[in-house]
Amino acid sequence: MKYMLMMHAPGGTGDYQVSNWAPEDLQAHLRFMHRMDTELAESGEKVAGEGLAPPAQAKIVRAGKKGAAVVTDGPCPESKEFLAGYWVVEVDRPERAYEIAAKASAAPGPGGKPMSIPFEIRQVMTGNVHPSDTDNV
């Protein structure tokens, strides 16, 4: 089963709060995330994963007249949280996806304190899974 683990970060300014951290705290956080990424790749559980640019750089696109792209600024800066990055993992049971997310949630923040980053976990729907087949999610 594939699951998307979506990491949410506190918002409010249109930028990441990590830009205000001490350099050593930011480096510790990035090392932790890179280690997680490497561990998931080495275990064969990682399907995909990326960090995302801050919401201030995001755009919302809708179809306008005759299908032309209508582009506006991205998520509202007053949002309490925003999507900071994600992993798609392939695991044998939902609990394993939860374990991975819990580990990533404990990434170090300022002073090395675990951040308890919220993760949204959703099963990736494929041609083999019907939307009504979500009992095991």
Image: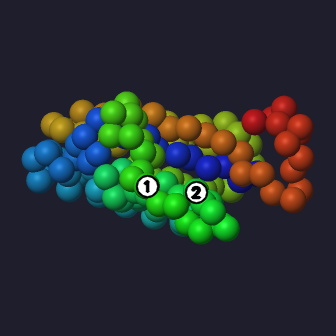
Foreground residue among 87 and 132: 132
Q: Amino acid at mark 1?
A: Thr
Left or right: where does residue 82 sit relative to residue 6?
left
Q: Quadrant of the C terminus?
A: top right
Which label was assigned to residue 72? 1
Foreground residue among 63 and 111: 63
Look at 41% across and 51% down and name the residue there: 74
75 is higher (above) or lower (below) than 51: above
Residue 24, how many percent across, how many down? 13, 52
- Give residue 51's quadrant in the image: bottom left
Left or right: where does residue 77 sit relative to residue 45?
left
Which label was assigned to residue 1? none
* Number of disc labels: 2
Q: Which residue is mark 2?
A: 62
Q: Amino acid at mark 2?
A: Arg
Look at 71% across and 45% down and name the residue there: 123
Q: Secondary structure at mark 1?
A: strand
Res. 64 in view: yes
Res. 36 in view: no
Left or right: where does residue 69 sit relative to residue 74?
right
Residue 9, how many percent across, how many down? 37, 40
